[in-house]
Each structure stands twice: as structure tokens, then as C-alpha cells.
Image: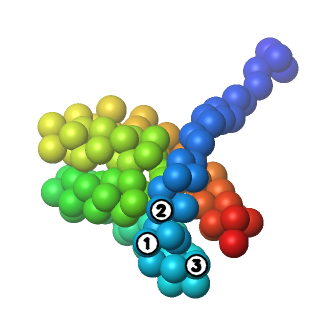
Amino acid sequence: MNNVRTLMPVEYAPIQLDALDLLKSNLGEGVGQDVISRAAEAVVDRMDQLETALDRDDLPEVAKLSRRLARIADHIGMHKFARIAEDLEACAKAADRNALAAISGRLQRVGQLNVCDVVHLSEENT
């Protein structure tokens, strides 16, 4: 019975660099970088708030935060993360707690990687 292993799912979610470049070209390099950094921080903050709402089983708040996450993420090239957040919003509105648990875990995994990637890539392309 010692042959049991825990698998850690990893999901590749590429950042759309054109979204980062568009922000920088429209706002200027410095302001664009600042906007990207603040948006990445907002994603982290909303993810923390989302975790709290999930722990409290506050489905209306989960739906609201998921919608906000999707909008912010879409602006900074985290399109796959944004789609997952939209899926989470739909699950919260449908009160589908099984799907909510699975999708919120996926959102956390992808979000952690994406936020780091956005910040790194936006600084790298400066």
C-alpha cells in the first residue's frame, strides 16, 4: 500500500503579451508598467477575498469577486485565468458547490502562476 502518490496538477496558461504591450503603448512605458503592477496586485487581493467568501459559503460575493477578477485579468493578458473566473461566477450563481470547489482550486493554481508571469514579463519587456 506504499505505492500511493499525490499528484499536483499543473496547467499551462500563457500570458497574452499583446495585451501588456498595448497597455504600455497606449499609456506610456512607465504608466503602463504601473497599471500592470497595480492590476496584478488587485488580482492577488481579489483572490484572497474570494478565498474568504468561499470559506463563508457566500455565493453572491463569490460571483461578484469572480466577475471582477475576470475583468481585471483580461486587461493584463491573463485570458485563460479570466475564463476560469467566469466559470466560477457561473457556478456560484447556479449554487453548484461541487463544481465551485473544483474550479476555485483551478483558479488558484492558474492565478498564482499567471500573476508572477505577468509581473515578470511586463518588467522584462521594458
> In front: 30, or 60?
30
Give the secondary structure at mark 3. Answer: helix
Image point (25%, 46%), residue name: 89
Q: In the drawing, what numbered circle is on residue 22?
A: 2
Image point (52%, 52%), residue name: 18
Q: Amino acid at mark 1?
A: Asn
Image point (46%, 41%), residue name: 80
> In front: 93, or 55?
93
Q: CA distance from mark 3 to mark 2?
A: 10 Å
> In front: 76, or 13?
76
Label 2 packing within 10 angstroms: few (<14), some (14-19), many (20+): some
- Viewport quadrant of the N terminus: top right
Q: Position of residue 52 (x, y in %)?
A: 37, 65
Question: Compared with residue 87, is residue 28 higher up or lower down, i.e. above or below?
Answer: below
Label 1 packing within 10 angstroms: few (<14), some (14-19), many (20+): few
- Viewport quadrant of the C terminus: bottom right
Q: In the visual, does 79 lie left or right of 93? A: right
